[in-house]
Image (cartoon, rainbow, N blue to C red):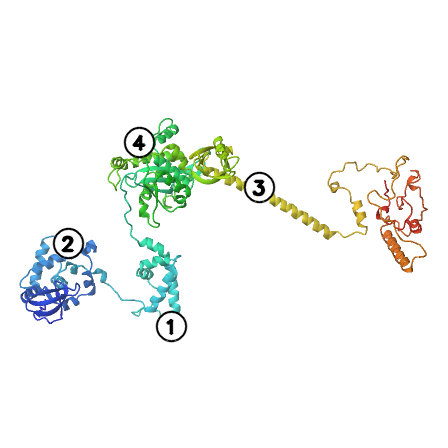
Amino acid sequence: MAVQVPVRIQSGAPVRIDGKAYSAGPVISGGRIFYDKEAGSQIVISEVQQLRLALHLRLLDDKKFEKLDPSRRQSLRIDFGTLSPDERRIALARARFVLKLDKVQPPLHRSKKKVIERIIEEVWKTGKIRLKDKPNARQVRTWYRFYVAGGRDVRALVPCHWAKGRRGERYSQWHRDTINRLISEKLVSPTPASFRQVRMAADRELREEAGRRGEKLERNDGTLFERIGGKLVARMLRKRDKFGVMVDTTNWREAQRRARSIQLGPQGECVNNEWEVDHTLLDILVIDEETMQIAGRPWLTAIIDRYSRCIVGFSISFAPPSWASVMDALRVAVMPKDWVYEGFKILGNGQSGIENPWNCHGKPDRLIMDHGRDFKSLSMEETLTALGIEPDHAKPKKPWLKGKIERWFGTLEEQIVHMMPGTVFSKWESRKFYNSEKMAVLTIDEVNWIVAKWVIDIYHQDQHAKIGRSPAQAWEEGLKETVPHREIPKDLLVPLTGLVVPRTLREGGIRYKGLRWDSDELSRVRAYLPDSADVQVRIDPLDISVCYVYDKKREEWVEGQLIEPMQALGKTLNQWVVISRLARRLRDEKKLEREDALARAFEQIDTYVRQRVADRKKGLAPKRFAAFVSSQSAWAKVRPASFDEDHEPPGGHLFDDDDDHAPAKPKRGPFREPKRPWTGSENPEDSPEDKARAAEFEQRADEEAADDIVVSPDVRVEDAPPTAPNADADRADPDETTAAPDVEQPTDGSRADDRDDGEANHDDDDDDDVTPVGFGRD
């Protein structure tokens, strides 16, 4: 192998010293200066050192390095630890042959074939070579050339299989532009299509574009094609910037979240220093104890101590995440847990079933929570202030700041919840063949006991991988290093952990969501307050039988008992809200049905009236006669008949009474005042204008009187026989005064006599004096 040793080096010429790039500088008294191209530093090498480096092939011309393949030069920049195990194994096996050859002296013998074959036999006989086949002399010589040109770096011996094959672009530029455009439109979007759809669209558009260009659809090597490669779209998508693809498919915030680093969250300094609280929906269906029907999935609110990883309190209920569930879990956390064992003994017939103590209680310095509405309520703020707890809302989009409680939720689901009957699992693939509703047999109280049993006897006693000891042990050891907090009195905790609502204290007590509380103590508070005074009221969400009103005068909470409704006793506030909402919805439905019925009735009436107006026309009879003959009740058409239809009609009736002692009846009806008599005069001294005006009034009165005469349909007015005046008709004998049924019978003299009677009765044209045929006056 010919090696060029730079005996004479020109200033500024590139050289390689142990594979590192240098630039030859000027010659000085102590030798020559060489400048490091990468670091920018300089070194001084004497002439003797230059000669020795050249003889050992450590100082070489840069041309040998430039003749290496780009893939070989790239392998020199790769971290050896990132290579695959096979690549590292092959490189180390080749190095055994190369290192043995590098020790041959003089250097010119290293290129001889016999020398190389002897070295191959010596190394191969050791049995330490992990190669499939024994190399030949030509291969070892090539490896040595790579090794020396690469600065005696073992990475120069790595097989570059990844650089084999055709590496040029097979498709023209407009082919790639079309495919990239379709990838941006159909794949890099919030609703991506499949690779098959993009590939088919690319085939179609490439054929159309080739037709417009008048070209054949062919690759750069001249081969024709009808369809692009099956993996071309995926390869082109992988070449794109991953962060940019995530921004286009989601949004910038989500891309930042996926690309950010996951840091280690706070670990806590001591016991009762920092607590984390959060909610989760348990992956299990529970049944109702009374109806044995599916009740739903309960919610779990838990509080964990950061330092010891102990669960200091939890609450399981059907109420969605709210301030009430947080206060319930906080009440369990800060108080001693003796009552928990007593409660389980009642459910377990005298046996709680829990073997280990639950000594976790106290008051934290800070409570870490997220930015939910339930953690930012007025009641939450006032309760934490009264208890001396500092609220700490973790920064959004950084789950590692509250990762202890989140990881515990996952441990609970994996170790116990997914093992219980009725679980719904967390992934759809797991519950695909599992009927959760059919297998559900546990009630919410039984799930509560199972979770408590697992927390106290399993989780607290098992060694925690992160802290290297059990949570219970970490709690006990941590208590010895801290000053215990003051225990919170129960009578203070219960009012503080209630729902705070501003209410008005009126006569009758406190009202809230259809509930009313009152007591004698509330009456005494109301006695010295103004009317309708605003007060602060705390309601226990888990026991609404009692409310607490703050008495500013005595500076204490005053109890009020639930007065109404009695159906709310024994129910939680959430249960009562659900019940009242359901009852209100039922009332609204009934009210809507009633209003619909009223609207239908009004519409039917309106339709009936319009139909009658359209079908009927006005009669020829006067309005008074129509009102007279229709004066009976409208119910007569609807009410059943009260007499027999076959009964004979009654005989004639007398219209006047024969009682001589009865007072004389007025000529006019009893229902109207008599009109002012006519003031006209026949005095010959009247002027002709007055006489003409009087005659006009008289003619008009006669016409109006003639229009009001109603006759029988069988008799006409002009054919009616004249009747003689009968001044005593009102006092006539009943046998002689029976009126003919078809002829109108005047009761106070004929109309003709009125017209001949002179001026005294000229105004007697009242409508009430005209009576229809067949009807008489009383």
Between the residue at mark 1 and the residue at mark 3, the CA separation in whole angstroms equals: 73 Å
The residue type indicated by label 3 comes to Lys
Tell me which corner region of the image, top left, top right, bottom left or bottom right, holds residue 96. Answer: bottom left
User: Does label 3 or label 2 sit earlier along the sequence?
Assistant: 2
Q: Are marks 2 and 1 in contact (CB under 8 Å)?
A: no
Q: Secondary structure at mark 2?
A: loop
Between the residue at mark 2 and the residue at mark 1, the CA separation in whole angstroms equals: 57 Å
| Residue at 79% across, 47% down | 626
Numbered mark located on residue 357 in the image: 4
Numbered mark located on residue 130 in the image: 2
User: Does label 2 or label 4 sit earlier along the sequence?
Assistant: 2
The residue type indicated by label 2 comes to Arg
**Residue nearest the viewer, comparing 2 with 356:** 356
Between the residue at mark 3 and the residue at mark 4, the CA separation in whole angstroms equals: 55 Å
Q: Position of residue 429 (x, y in %)?
A: 36, 46
The residue type indicated by label 1 comes to Arg
